[in-house]
Image: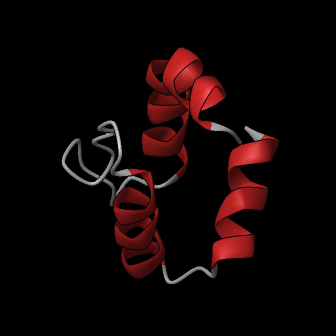
């Protein structure tokens, strides 16, 4: 997912992620300009997923 896609669809993706993984909070899913990698790092740690697994999950949503 590129930055434009993430910003454009982020509210929708955020809702789907929270439905799929109830453990996620709004703070975990904060998408700030220039902080994409930091957010992905938080998600990887919280979900126990690799970078590739996380990218696959996002693509499937």
Q: Which residue is at the front of the view, 12 or 40?
A: 40
Q: Quadrant of residue 46?
A: bottom left
Q: Residue at x 33, y 36 (%)?
A: 33
Where does the image place residue 35, in percent across and percent down from the top left? 33, 51
Spot occupied by residue 5 in the image (x, y as percentages of width and height)? 65, 26
Q: Can you say whether 5 is above or below 41 in the image?
A: above
Of all residues shown, which one is farthest toward the left? 27
Residue at the outermost top position: 8
User: Where 13 sits versus 26, above or below?
Assistant: above
36 or 44: nearer the viewer: 36
The image position of residue 24, as x and y in percent, is: 33, 55
Image height of 50 relative to 8, above or below: below
Position of 49 with respect to 14 (left or right) is right
* Residue 58 x, y percent position in the rendering: 68, 47
The colour scheme applied to this rendered structure is secondary structure
Q: Quadrant of residue 2?
A: top right
Q: Residue at x 44, y 62 (%)?
A: 37
Taking depth in this image into account, of 46 and 2 the one nearest to the observer is 2
- The reply, left or right, for residue 31 in relation to residue 14 is left
Total tally of numbered discs in the picture = 0
**Viewer-proximal residue among 6 and 49:** 6
Q: Where's the C terminus, which quadrant?
A: top right
Look at the image and tell me in which quarter the N terminus lies: top right
């Amino acid at each position: 997912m590129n930055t434009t896609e993430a910003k454009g669809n982020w509210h929708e993706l955020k809702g789907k992620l929270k439905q799929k993984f109830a453990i996620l909070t709004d703070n975990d899913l904060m998408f700030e300009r220039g902080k994409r990698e930091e957010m992905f790092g938080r998600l990887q740690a919280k979900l126990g997923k690799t970078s590739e697994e996380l990218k696959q999950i996002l693509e499937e949503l």
